[in-house]
Amino acid sequence: MRLMTFFLALFMAFAISRSPGVAAGSMADASSEVHVSVAVLSFNCPKFSGHLLYTLRSGSTSVDYHAVALKSATDDYLLSFSVRPGHYQLLVDSELPDQDNPLYHSASCETQQWFTAIPDHERHLALVLGNAMIPHSDCSIAGSLPASGLGIDLVLPKGHILAETIVGGQLGPTPEEVDYGAEIDGAAYYIEHVPAEDFVLRFGSIEIPMDLTKLTDVSSPYCQGEFIHNITTEEMHRAFVAGFETE
C-alpha cells in the first residue's frame, strides 16, 4: 500500500511539474493568432442586413464561414475573426432575404481582398460590397514599425532594369521612380500586389534593399509569397538623425 501511495504521489508530482509547460504552449498557440476587424460597407446593397458568407483562402486551403456582421453607428457592418500569421484572400458574399430562398447570394453584393497578418499586430480592413474585382495575389511585404504613425514606402528606383516575368530575362529601365506606398495599420506596414522586382524600402533618410528577384521565381507570371522586414531600432536611428529634414 505504501509503495502504491509512493508511485501515485510521484506521478502526481510529475504531472503538476509538467502542467505549466503545457499551459504555456497552449497560451503561445492562442497568442500567435492575429485578430482581424473588417468594416463591411454596404451602400451598394440596400437589402443587406449583416448576414454574409466569407471565405478565407491561404495557399491550397479554403474555408467557408457563415456570419452575422454587427451594424455600427456609422451604418457600416463590423466583421471580426482571427487567423494565424500569413497571406490570405478574403472573399465576402452577402446573403440577402428573398421570398423563394431565405438566403441567396448576389454577384452585385460580393467583394474580395488580399491581406497579410503578422504576429502581435491586429489588422483593420475595409471592404465595399459590390466591388467584385479579382486581383492576382502577387507577393506581399510587411513588417513592424518602431512606433505607431511612422511612415514607410516601397520604391522602384528610376533606371531600374525591370525583370521579365513571363519568359525570363530583362526589360528596359524604368523611366521614373515608382512609389508603391504602404498601408500603415497601427505600428505595422503592409504592401500587397507586389511584383518580383528589385525594390527598396524608403524609411526616413535610409533605403533598405528588398530584392524580390533573388527571392522568387521571376519566370513565373506572378510573384508568390510574403516577405517580412521588421524595422529595427538601429534602422530608426539611422533614418532620423539629428537635423534630418523632409520636404
Image: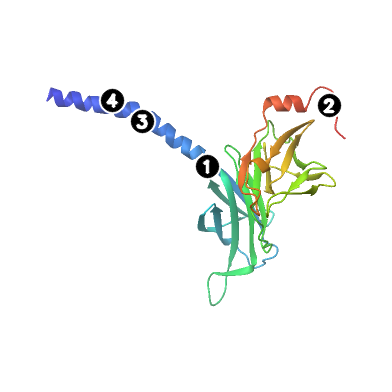
Query: Could you say whether the residue bearing mark 2 is in a helix, strand or loop?
Result: loop
Question: How far is mark 1 from mark 2, CA to CA?
Answer: 38 Å
Mark 3: secondary structure: helix
Which of disc 2 and disc 1 is earlier in sequence? 1
Find disc 2 in the rendering and name its residue.
244
Q: Is mark 4 on a helix, strand or loop?
A: helix
* Mark 2 touches mark 3? (CB < 8 Å): no
Q: Which residue is drawn at 62% across and 65% down?
A: 48
Q: Which residue sits at x=65%, y=33%?
A: 230
Q: Residue 126's x, y, as percent?
A: 67, 52
Q: If the image is split into quadrants, where does the C terminus sit?
A: top right
| Callout 1: SS | loop
State which tag comes first along the sequence, 3 or 4.
Answer: 4
Q: Name the residue under label 1.
A: 33
Label 4 sits on residue: 13
- Which of the 4 quarters of the picture holds residue 187? top right
Drawn side of residue 228 relative to residue 64, left or right: right
The image position of residue 51, as x and y in percent, is 56, 62
Q: Mark 3 points at which residue?
A: 19
* Front residue of 245 and 162: 162
Q: Residue furthest bottom?
A: 100
> Mark 2 or mark 4: which comes first in sequence?
4
Mark 1 is surrounded, within 10 Å at the Cα level, by few (under 14), some (14 to 19) or many (20 or more) other residues, namely some
